[in-house]
Image (cartoon, grey):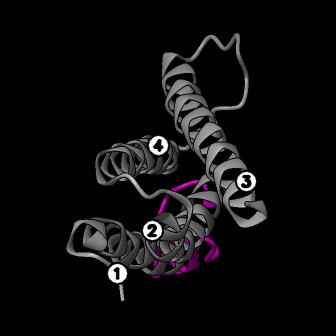
Amino acid sequence: MTEPGHRRLIGAGLVCLALGASGGVWHFFASQSPSSPLHLSFLPGPIQRFAFWSLALGVILPLLSLLLPLAVDDDARRDRLERWLLVGAGLKIAGMMLGAVWGVYGVQIIDPRPKSVTVMTLRIFGDAILVVLFVRLAWTFLRRQRS
């Protein structure tokens, strides 16, 4: 069972799953023909990316709540890693959600649209935090398993 401090990751995972499910419904309506009364005037591509990454993080965060105690013994360090995981996931999801609402992918470094640069910046910082933490956790976990 997970420790009480790691319920935040489970809660954040559930929120991400709910966002992913709502993003899937939003994508369905945005993908309808423009002549349909069910059509929502949003670009479906960024909405689909938002829904996918929300669902992915909704699965990954609760799994990490189970793996953190196996990889890190120190409670203070575990809390710090957990907070950084939440910050990275929050930045990633915020960037994806803004991209879905504004109808931009946010993949160009130099873009005349300031909205696209904002989306890209949030995504890159969120991704960078998550990648560093995943590599660090994997390294720590594998090192502990060897000893």
Q: Judge by depth and name the residue closer to the eye, 53 or 3.
A: 3
Kind of residue at badge 3: Arg
Select label 4 or label 3 by which is in front: 3
As helix, strand or loop, the secondary structure at mark 1 comes to loop
Up-down relation of residue 71 to residue 85 (above or below): below
Contact (CB < 8 A) between labels 1 and 2? yes
As helix, strand or loop, the secondary structure at mark 2 comes to helix
The answer to whether 55 appears left or right of 91 in the picture is right
Which residue is denoted by mark 3 in the rendering?
143
The CA distance from mark 4 to mark 3 is: 24 Å
Contact (CB < 8 A) between labels 2 and 3? no
- Mark 1 and mark 2 lie on one chain; the one further toward the N terminus is 1
Which residue is denoted by mark 2 in the rendering?
69
- Mark 4 and mark 2 lie on one chain; the one further toward the N terminus is 2
Select label 2 or label 3 by which is in front: 3
Magenta segment = 25-45
How crowded pointer 1 is (Cα within 10 Å; few <14, some 14-19, many 20+) is rated as few
Quarter of the N terminus within the rendering? bottom left
Kind of residue at badge 1: Thr
Residue 103: image x %, image y %? 55, 44
Up-down relation of residue 49 to residue 14 (above or below): above
Which residue is denoted by mark 4 in the rendering?
88
Contact (CB < 8 A) between labels 4 and 3? no
Kind of residue at badge 2: Pro
